[in-house]
Amino acid sequence: MIPTLFGYALVQCQTRFLNNQGVVIPLMLSPLLCSVLNVPLCWLLVLKSPLANKGAAMALSISYWFNAILLALYIKYSPTCKETWTGFSRDAFHHVPQFLKLGVSSALMIW
């Protein structure tokens, strides 16, 4: 399930970005497409392969990463995000140490 967490984190960031832009159609269509993909993928990896429970986790991870890729492509190539998305800069990583400090302590409390 660890690869799923990274895909989920990307999807959350992309969702917040698109919500702030007022763009909701891709936020509706992308998970719909991923859900349609997830059903046969779960069937294949859980029931038809020897993976069983691990296949369910793998299918979920693939679906989250597919959703993240779809939203990233939309953000990169859509004319609605052309003026608001200018790419990554060093400013995006300015508060990472504070975030990690909170994240690590939060993770340790759960453990």
Image (cartoon, rainbow, N blue to C red):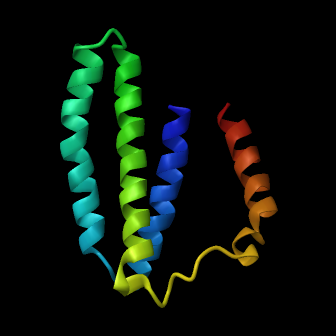
Q: Is residue 81 above or below residue 14?
A: below
The residue drawn where x is 22% and y is 62% is: 29
Q: Is residue 21 above or below residue 63?
A: below
Question: x, y percentage for residue 41?
Answer: 25, 31
Work out which residue is located at the far front of the displayed protein and give it.
77
Q: Which image quadrant for residue 94?
A: bottom right
Q: Quadrant of the C terminus?
A: top right
Query: Left or right: where does residue 110 sit relative to residue 1?
Result: right
Query: Left or right: where does residue 105 sit relative to residue 16?
Result: right
Question: x, y percentage for residue 95?
Answer: 76, 69
Question: x, y percentage for residue 6?
Answer: 55, 46
The residue drawn where x is 21% and y is 54% is: 32
Of residue 77 and residue 110, the one placed in the foreground of this image is: 77
Q: Which image quadrant for residue 51?
A: top left
Q: Which image quadrant for residue 47?
A: top left
Question: x, y percentage for residue 68?
Answer: 42, 55
The residue drawn where x is 42% and y is 37% is: 61
Of residue 86 and residue 47, the one placed in the foreground of this image is: 86
